[in-house]
Amino acid sequence: LTSTNTHARRMAFASIDQVLSFPTKITAAVPMLRNAANDRDAVRAARSIRGLSEHQLQPEIVVPTLIQISSNSVLRFICFSAFGRYGAAATPAIPCLLDGLTDRDPRARLNATNALLKIAPEALTNAPAR
């Protein structure tokens, strides 16, 4: 995943996709996916974030990682969507999601709203006006 060789990185990401198709192996992929979620290639990072959240893997580890990654304006809306998939386990992301309600990117605002509806709908009543 960290190789400078494009082909090697592509193959590593293909391996991750294969691991995600085997539910009994998914937990073992969390460290790889966490690293891949920080990849400089936004498409690959997004695939990793989706892989982590679709299976709601290890929220105690993944949610804080996604909070950090959400500072990346390109990936923010994907992280917000991921928080929604985690539901109540993503409660630590509420401040981040509240900030997202006023984001310049309409996708981020929409995903922040939808995630808050799943995690803490009461937070929207006191949310900042758009």
Image (cartoon, rainbow, N blue to C red):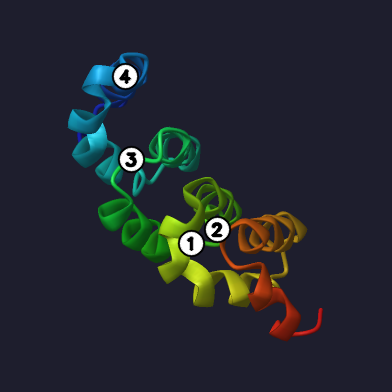
Q: Are marks 3 and 1 in contact (CB under 8 Å)?
A: no
Q: Residues within 10 Å of mark 2 (few under 14, many from 20)?
A: many
Q: Are marks 2 and 1 in contact (CB under 8 Å)?
A: yes
Residue beneath the point at 80% across and 84% down: 129
Name the residue type under label 4.
Pro
Q: Residues within 10 Å of mark 4 (few under 14, many from 20)?
A: few
Q: Give the number of the disc on residue 37.
A: none
Give how far across and how far down residue 41 sits, in percent.
43, 40
Name the residue type under label 2.
Arg
Q: Are marks 4 and 3 in contact (CB under 8 Å)?
A: no
The residue beneath circle 1 is 72
Residue 1 appears in the picture as rendered: no
Name the residue type under label 3.
Leu
Mark nearer the viewer, 2 or 1: 2
Give how far across and how far down residue 56 sits, in percent.
40, 40
The residue beneath circle 2 is 76
Q: CA distance from mark 3 to mark 1?
A: 21 Å
Give the vertical position of 20 relative to 109 (above or below). Answer: above
Identify the mark nearer the N-term, 2 or 3: 3
Question: 69 and 119: which one is in front?
Answer: 119
Residue beneath the point at 23% across and 32% down: 27
